[in-house]
Image: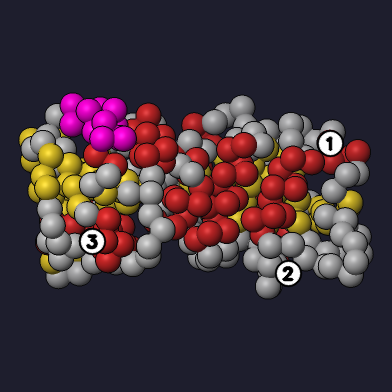
């Protein structure tokens, strides 16, 4: 397809970058047609290295020269696609080569809705979401796993993914009500690590008696479960008994509500992060980073 110079954010070829909802892009009913949008040169390169397939690339005019290597690499790919929305869902029409759209700075700002942009966006085929069991099958030697319960804020999910990648967490599992890690904000905050860390969705929760899902799945794979929560009987995060656990699953809830009581009661232990000055909770993104570092294998 080559480079296509555009002059207006209203061009329908750019709908995928701003005018389609995350629900449409996810295309839950047609998994093969699902699309995600990655922002920044770094995130796009991470995604491509992890095997994601670009459909089109959008650059700010001034980035055309500075991102010449990225343009060359993407342009060399054999297949791209145009994304259309109809009747509430997305379809992808394949095309030869990956279209590379170029737009002036002001028009890109109109398109994305904010003035601070790195000027590089890429629409990509969305990878199929895996179940928690599939993820654990893929990392049979996993020793540290994180479980996010009901975390609906995309920024927190993206930050937790980045911490998981940086601090050696083997997999991240999400309860059914957690935010989708592949929405644009989560991908951006994760700096692309959402494509690197194995993650999957728990279909039932807490499902303590189901060896194929929920807490029962974790126990069937040999994991001890630790709920991060404030309880009188909780272990301090630095307790040496925690460091001796071979396979540990750490469970995190939201800052406001924390983990559900049923979840806490069903876990093998409760763990607290020691805090001072009367502070009794941390944002879940901060809590995950602290716990991942302290309890690393």
Q: Residue at x 57, y 44 (%)?
A: 162
Q: Residue at x 18, y 31 (%)?
A: 75
**Is residue 249 positioned above or below 70 on the image?**
below
Q: Position of residue 289 (x, y in %)?
A: 69, 47
> In the rendered image, which quarter contains the N terminus?
top left
Query: Helix or strand or loop: what does disc 3 sit on?
Result: helix
The residue that mark 3 highlights is: 107
The residue that mark 1 highlights is: 243
How far, Cα to Cα, is label 1 from label 3?
53 Å
Q: Position of residue 193 (x, y in %)?
A: 50, 40
Q: Is residue 229 left or right of residue 254?
A: right
Query: Helix or strand or loop: what does disc 1 sit on?
Result: helix
Please say whether residue 71 is one of the residues in the magenta stretch. Answer: yes
Most foreground residue, 257 or 124: 124
For marks 2 and 1, give the one nearer the viewer.
1
Magenta extent: 65-76
Most foreground residue, 225 or 21: 21
For marks 1 and 3, give the one nearer the viewer.
3
Residue 190 visible in the displayed image: yes
Label number found at residue 261: 2
Q: Residue at x 23, y 47 (%)?
A: 61
Q: Position of residue 154 (x, y in %)?
A: 50, 61
Q: Residue at x 41, y 34 (%)?
A: 46
How far, Cα to Cα, is label 3 from label 2?
49 Å
Give the class, few, some or many, for how many residues have Cα within 10 Å of label 1's Cα (few <14, many ≥20): some
């Amino acid at each position: 397809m080559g480079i296509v110079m555009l002059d207006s954010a209203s061009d329908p070829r750019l709908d995928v970058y701003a005018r389609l909802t995350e629900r449409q892009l996810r295309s839950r009913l047609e998994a093969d047609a699902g699309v995600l949008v990655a922002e920044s040169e770094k995130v796009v390169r991470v995604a491509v290295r992890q095997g994601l397939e670009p459909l089109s690339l959008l650059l700010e005019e001034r980035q055309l020269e500075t991102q010449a290597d990225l343009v060359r690499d993407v342009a060399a790919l054999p297949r791209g696609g145009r994304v259309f929305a109809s009747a509430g869902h997305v379809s992808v029409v394949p095309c030869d080569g990956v279209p590379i759209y170029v737009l002036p700075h002001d028009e890109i700002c109109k398109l994305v809705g904010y003035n601070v942009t790195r000027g590089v966006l890429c629409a990509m085929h969305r990878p199929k979401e895996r179940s928690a069991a599939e993820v654990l099958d893929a990392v049979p030697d996993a020793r540290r796993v994180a479980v996010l319960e009901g975390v609906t804020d995309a920024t927190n999910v993206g930050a937790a993914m980045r911490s998981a990648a940086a601090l050696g967490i083997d997999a991240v599992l999400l309860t059914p009500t957690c935010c989708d890690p592949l929405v644009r904000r989560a991908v951006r905050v994760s700096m692309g690590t959402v494509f690197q860390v194995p993650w999957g969705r728990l279909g039932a929760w807490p499902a303590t008696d189901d060896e194929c899902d929920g807490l029962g799945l974790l126990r069937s794979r040999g994991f001890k479960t630790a709920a991060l929560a404030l309880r009188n009987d909780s272990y301090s995060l630095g307790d040496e008994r925690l460091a001796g656990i071979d396979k540990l699953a750490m469970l995190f809830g939201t800052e406001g509500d924390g983990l559900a009581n049923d979840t806490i009661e069903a876990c093998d232990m409760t763990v607290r992060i020691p805090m001072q000055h009367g502070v009794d909770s941390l944002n879940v993104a901060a809590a995950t980073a602290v716990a991942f570092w302290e309890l690393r294998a």
